[in-house]
């Protein structure tokens, strides 16, 4: 009996023994290129002051305008300087309600310029939308895809206008200009001095001057001469003119 008790106790001790804890494998050191966060605020303005969608403005064509939609693609965003870095292939901005911010990771370095396109380059404009997340900037849910043309709108610029500069109240006529088609894609490079440091956030303000959608000092967007454009080949004139003007309306603060 005594031997049986001793055997039982030994078995219990063996069964209750705990193995020493296993030390976890050390995490690998962080790798990759040292980078910082670039936070870009895209800010709508009108001739140097904050844009207000409730204001009726006087355009360079001497027309009263109420802007109700300013929505467009920038593609790509490429910064150059000590090195070249592509922040994104495409970003969709909807600025009628005020500024929008986007954040991107950029390698450490000094940058002095930003190259961008207004609209989408050929490869993106003709991408198969069925293979793209509907909720993404390029997805079918963006409100920018022309199903009938199997390509994208680049810029939606809408509102109301009045040819009488002395008029009052809400302008009586509607304008709706949608640029698209490859002919409307425009590219430009602007100065953007930036110094990116490892792990830090750097801010950049990009102003979009809606007043300059109407003139660059040479061309003039006169809504009374073409208030509607929706990608029709036979009516590309207003869309081409708006594309020429709008790409120049984007500048770093």
Image: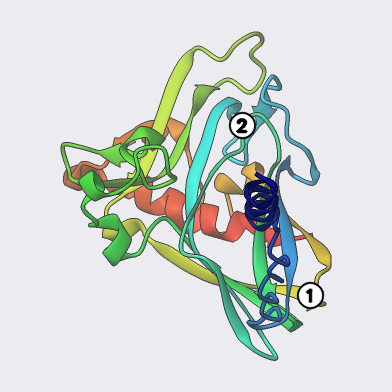
User: Of the numbered discs in the image, which one, if any, rests on residue 121?
Assistant: none
Position in image of residue 230 (x %, y %): 29, 36
Where on the picture, by quarter, is residue 29? Answer: bottom right
Q: Residue furthest top?
A: 169
Position in image of residue 243 (x %, y %): 44, 54
How many residues crowd around disc 2 within 10 Å: few (fewer than 14), some, or many (20 or more)?
many
Please report the residue visible at 32 percent of the width from the left and 49 percent of the height from the top.
180
How many residues crowd around disc 1 within 10 Å: few (fewer than 14), some, or many (20 or more)?
some
Please report the residue visible at 27 percent of the width from the left and 48 percent of the height from the top.
236
Position in image of residue 195 (x %, y %): 81, 78
Of residues 57 and 185, the one nearer the viewer is: 185
Dot in front, 1 or 2: 1
- Position of the C terminus by quadrant: bottom right
Protein image colouring? rainbow
Please report the residue visible at 41 percent of the width from the left and 37 percent of the height from the top.
135
Q: Is residue 162 visible?
A: no
For marks 1 and 2, the one nearer the N-term is 2
Rendered view: 191 above or below 205: below
- Position of the N terminus by quadrant: top right
Q: Are marks 1 and 2 in contact (CB under 8 Å)?
A: no
- 231 vs 115, left or right, is left
Please report the residue visible at 57 percent of the width from the left and 38 percent of the height from the top.
61
Q: Alpha carbon of mark 1 to alpha carbon of mark 2: how far?
A: 27 Å
Q: Which residue is mark 1?
A: 194
- 26 vs 71, left or right, is right
Label 2: state its secondary structure: loop
Where on the picture, by quarter, is residue 251? Answer: bottom right
Position in image of residue 82 (x %, y %): 70, 91
Of residues 138 and 52, the one nearer the viewer is: 138
Q: Which residue is mark 2?
A: 96
């Amino acid at each position: 009996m005594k031997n049986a008790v001793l055997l039982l106790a030994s078995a219990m001790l063996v069964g209750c023994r705990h193995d020493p804890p296993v030390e976890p494998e050390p995490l690998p050191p962080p790798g990759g290129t040292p980078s910082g966060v670039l936070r870009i605020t895209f800010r709508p303005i009108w001739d140097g002051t904050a844009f207000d969608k409730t204001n009726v403005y006087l355009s360079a064509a001497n027309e009263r305008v109420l802007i109700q939609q300013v929505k467009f693609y920038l593609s790509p965003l490429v910064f150059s300087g000590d090195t070249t870095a592509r922040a994104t292939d495409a970003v969709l901005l909807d600025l009628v309600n005020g500024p929008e911010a986007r954040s991107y990771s950029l390698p450490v370095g000094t940058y002095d310029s930003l190259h961008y396109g207004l609209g989408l380059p050929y490869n993106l404009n003709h991408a198969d939308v069925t293979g793209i997340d509907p909720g993404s900037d390029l997805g079918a849910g963006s409100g920018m895809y022309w199903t009938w043309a199997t390509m994208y709108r680049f810029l939606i610029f809408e509102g109301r206008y009045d040819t009488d500069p002395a008029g009052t109240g809400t302008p009586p006529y509607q304008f709706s200009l949608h640029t698209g088609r490859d002919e409307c894609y425009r590219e430009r490079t602007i100065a953007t001095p930036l110094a990116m440091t490892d792990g830090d956030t750097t801010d950049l303000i990009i102003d979009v001057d809606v007043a300059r959608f109407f003139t660059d000092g040479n061309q003039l967007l006169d809504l009374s001469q073409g208030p509607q454009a929706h990608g029709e080949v036979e009516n590309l004139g207003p869309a081409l003119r708006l594309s020429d003007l709008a790409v120049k309306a984007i500048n770093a603060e």
